[in-house]
Amino acid sequence: MVSNSQQNRRLSILGKDMDSTITPLFHEHNFVSSETKIPAKLLEVKIEINGQIILFIFDDDKSSKLEITVRMCDEILLSRDGYRKMAKIYPELIRNYKIEECGLKISKEMEELVPINIFNIDSDCNTNVENERESNSTDNLDDLIINQEIGNGVYRSITSLLHLLIPILNEKFILKENDTIYLKLGADGRNVGRYHNHVIYTVCILNQKEDVLFPENQYR
């Protein structure tokens, strides 16, 4: 029995082979625009196997629709299995392996823009944190980072988040030039086992007013 991941890889290879095979045929049979000299483009191919309809989409303009679909699945907490079942019923939906590829691509981009750093909390942590507050810099905090160990804490830089969010808020006219940015920090803890607990810190931008009540505007 072929697993879903193996099937997705085979479908991905099949789609690439179809695209690379058919494109030269457009040139061979002169399916080329007389004005732009651009050959015809393969948009979609629909096949059926074991009663299952599979739709291949080759249009590059679908990238924005693909990213919107990934975001929608995240917002409504739709699992991979749930989307896969829907795609079997509605073949016009983007294939599941495309969703996974796009999700991984977005995750890698976010790791570069807002990296997750690792640090260890030890007996000297309180002293370092107090010094951090007094100096108002990240030098002491960076001293806690352990790059080659798992560590017992992770953090994202608020500065990195703001570099990413401020242009978006400017485009939406939420922030203007020279506006003061108001931040609110919060934390939520929960037990993990008998002796350990996790604390998740969040930050929101109060300039967004009522929109800060929405979960997507609470940044971890």
Image (cartoon, rainbow, N blue to C red):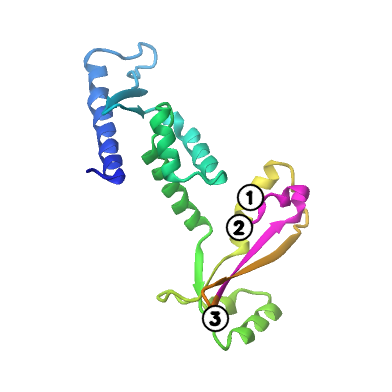
Q: Quadrant of residue 160?
A: bottom right
- Mark earlier in primary sequence (3, 2): 3
Give the labeled residue for mark 3. 121
Q: CA distance from mark 3 to mark 2?
A: 23 Å
Q: Is residue 177 visible?
A: no
Instruction: Tell me if 200 is positioned left or right of 67 in this view.
Output: right
Quadrant position of the N terminus in the picture? top left
Rendered image: mark on residue 216: 1
SS at mark 3? Answer: loop
| Circles 3 and 2 in contact, beta carbons < 8 Å | no
Q: Which residues are magenta?
A: 197-220
What amino acid is at disc 1? Glu
Give the labeled residue for mark 2. 161
Q: Is residue 14 visible?
A: yes
Q: Is residue 41 above or below residue 215?
A: above
Q: CA distance from mark 3 to mark 1?
A: 29 Å
What amino acid is at disc 2? Leu
**Residue located 49% across and 33% down the image:** 65
- Mark earlier in primary sequence (3, 1): 3
